[in-house]
Structures are given as C-alpha cells and as structure tokens.
Image (spheres, helix red, strand yellow):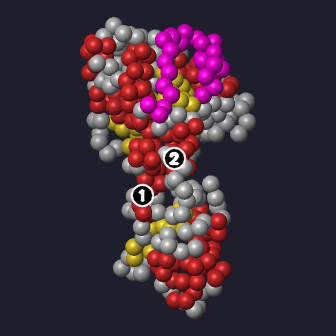
Amino acid sequence: MTTDVRSLRRPRVKPEHRPYRTVDGHVRIGSVVHGIGAEIADPKGWVWLLVEALDGSRAPSAVVARVLAGHGDVTGEDVWQAMADLLAAGFLEDAAAPVPVSGRGRERYSRGVPLLRWMDRGPRTSPWEAQLLLRRARVLVLGVGGTGGHAAQSLVASGVGQVHCVDPDVVELSNLNRQPLFREDDIGRPKTEAAVATLRALNSDVTVTGERLEVRGPADLTALLAGGDPDLLVLAADRPDDLRRWVNRACIAAGLPWVDAGYRGPLVTAGVYVPGRGACWECLRVGEAARRELRLAPGQDERVASPRMPWNPASAVTAGLSGALLAHAALALLTGIPDLEPGFRFGVNLMLPGEPHLQRFPRQADCAACGGVRT
C-alpha cells in the first residue's frame, strides 16, 4: 500500500470511479453509489483537466505539467496536493502496477477484483493487493449447514487461502431445502466430509480441510483456535445455546476477529466483532435488551417473546441471505474493503423490504466479556 502519489508510475482514476462534470461545473467522481462517490467544486476548471489527465498514460510529473499548461492561475503545489487527496480518498491507482498473480488466477478473479477496487476507499497501488490478502488468509468456519454452507462457498470462490470447516452433524433430507454443499447422495454422510469435497471441487487453489467435531464448551473452542491459528472465525452454528457467548469470550482472549450470522424467521442478520474495537457480542446483547420494550410481566422470561423451536424455520432464501451477509462481513475484515467499524449487527427483514436493520451500541465499560480489554 502507498500514500505517496509520487511513487505511482502512471496514476489513473479507477475505471469504476470515472468522473463526470455536473451542469453547474462541479466534478463528480467515484460513481453514484452512496458511500463511494464525491463531488468536488471546480470554479476555475482545472480539477476537471486534472482528472482527465489522470488516464494512466502519464507519469505524475507529466500530469502536473499538463494541468499547468492549461491553467496558468494554478500552482504545481496545488496540483500535487489534489492528486494526493484523490489517492488518499481511494480514487486513484497505478496503471503500471504489475499483476502479482498467475494467468489462471487473473482470469478466475477477473470479476471480483474490480468490485473490490470499486468499494476500496484506501490508497492502494494495485487492486490485486486485496486479492493477495485473501490468498494469505486462514479462516475457521463453525457450521456448514445453510448459513455456513453459503458463506464457505463464497469464501472459497473468492480465493481465501485456507478454509477449515467444523461441524458435528450428518446430512439429512431436511437439510437439502437450504444447504448448498450437499446432494441427495450425501444423505447420511458427515457434513464436513461432503462439504470439503464440494468446496475443493469449486476452487483447487484453496486449501480446504474439515473436522467432524461438536463444540461442547469453551475448552473445545480454545483447542480449535490454538490448533488452526486462524486469522478470522466465521460462526454459522447456533447450538448449543451458549455457543455465541463462548465464541465471543474465546475470540476476545485470543485477540481474534470474528463474524456471525443467522435468521429468526424472516429477520436475517450478521454481526462483525474485533476485540478491542467497538462493542463485543455481549455489549450488543446488553444494548439491544435495554432498547427493546417487550412489556413482560414481572418474573417472565424474555424467551416467551421469541420462542425457540427444535429447529429454526428456514428456506434457501433466508439461508442464502444470511450466508451472503456473513461472507461479506468476513471478506471485509480480511481485506479492509469496505472499511467497516466493528461492533455491530446488520441485516434485512423480509417482511419489510427496504427497511434497514442495524444494531450498534457503545462498548460497555463494565462488560463481563470485554470490559478489561484495551482499545
């Protein structure tokens, strides 16, 4: 990564961020997607000349010379600073930067890397830097059913270097309405065995391993983390009931980022956690409990407002959505694209299309899990 525009050999505006001029002469750059694009006032017109010159055909000094030749009332210092600002905002890259992957990898990820480039607001020389981060990453996936199967499929397809899958169950017929890694021929087969075979067939450049294991307590998690030394934990299991609490505390102890996802009927959510940065899972639970107004009678257990069943009602839609959100959160933490501030849950409610779902609360200073962790 670079923050020095002078180190770019042939700077250019990213193709996805191609600028245009508004009717009032401003320069819009970065696309019309909220969270990416920006508008620059350009009363003298030299900013437009600058972004036009940033087409990847010139060295930085030649770009400056081109602008100065067209506008005598701007200084070289102003132009250099404007280029540096565009780079820092994530709008520029080096057209001459080498592609540090093989021809096979270049073709495989030729559609995903431009999306990473589009969303990236960091000053990188090459969009392939993010793909290299994925190739070096080690991810532990707990649960490869509906949510976990969709997430693992996305991680492997995206080129995460090592993916280790853990699940205690065997494939059942009732799984097949939503769990993408299994087929009818897999019924009765351990899920990890079938999942590993499917994932390896998807991307032979990724190391996929599996382990049939039931996490029965914190000690099992500690052993898993110590044995695999992952960069990220992806939680897609919801049993036993205390599993998320165990994972939260194990990851805090290990300093390990983690993500989780699932569904409660039509409500699909995912969470993003980094020890020492923002609220932990237990902080969010406390914040959400204080926000809700369940109007329970004295002594009434809050679970009566959201009853548990022997299985979680789900379809291919809810499993696919939760797995996609989970994979997005995981890839964002691994690459920094987009740059997420951790300590929140987000998702969708299928009953109310278009209404966003977001839980974000301050970190609790007296949290039993993370209260002693330094920021």
Residue 223: in magenta span: yes
Q: Position of residue 308 (x, y in %)?
A: 38, 15
Judged from this view, the residue extending furthest toward the bottom is 72
The numbered disc on residue 34 is 1
Q: Residue at x 54, y 74 (%)?
A: 58
Give the crowd class for mark 1: few <14, some 14-19, many >=20 residues within 10 Å: few
Kindly give the residue lying farthest to the top in the view shown. 188
Asked if one can make out residue 237 in the rendered structure from this viewpoint, the answer is: no
Answer whether residue 193 is visible to the viewer in this image.
yes
The amino acid beneath tag 1 is His
Q: Are marks 1 and 2 in contact (CB under 8 Å)?
A: no
The residue segment tinted magenta is 204-230
Q: Position of residue 222 (x, y in %)?
A: 64, 17
Of mark 1 and mark 2, the one earlier in the sequence is 1
Dot 2, how many residues are within 10 Å of its Cα: few (below 14), some (14-19), or many (20+)? some
Q: Give the quadrant of the C terminus.
A: top right
**Residue 98 located left or right of residue 153:** right
Name the spot of residue 189 as percent of width and height, x first.
Answer: 36, 10
Is 350 above or below relative to 194?
below
**Residue under the image location 40 percent in, 58 percent down:** 33
- Residue 146 falls in image quadrant: top left
What residue is disc 2 on? 101
> Considering only vertical position in the picture, is 320 above or below 119?
above
Between tags 1 and 2, which lies in front? 2
Front-most of 93 and 349? 93
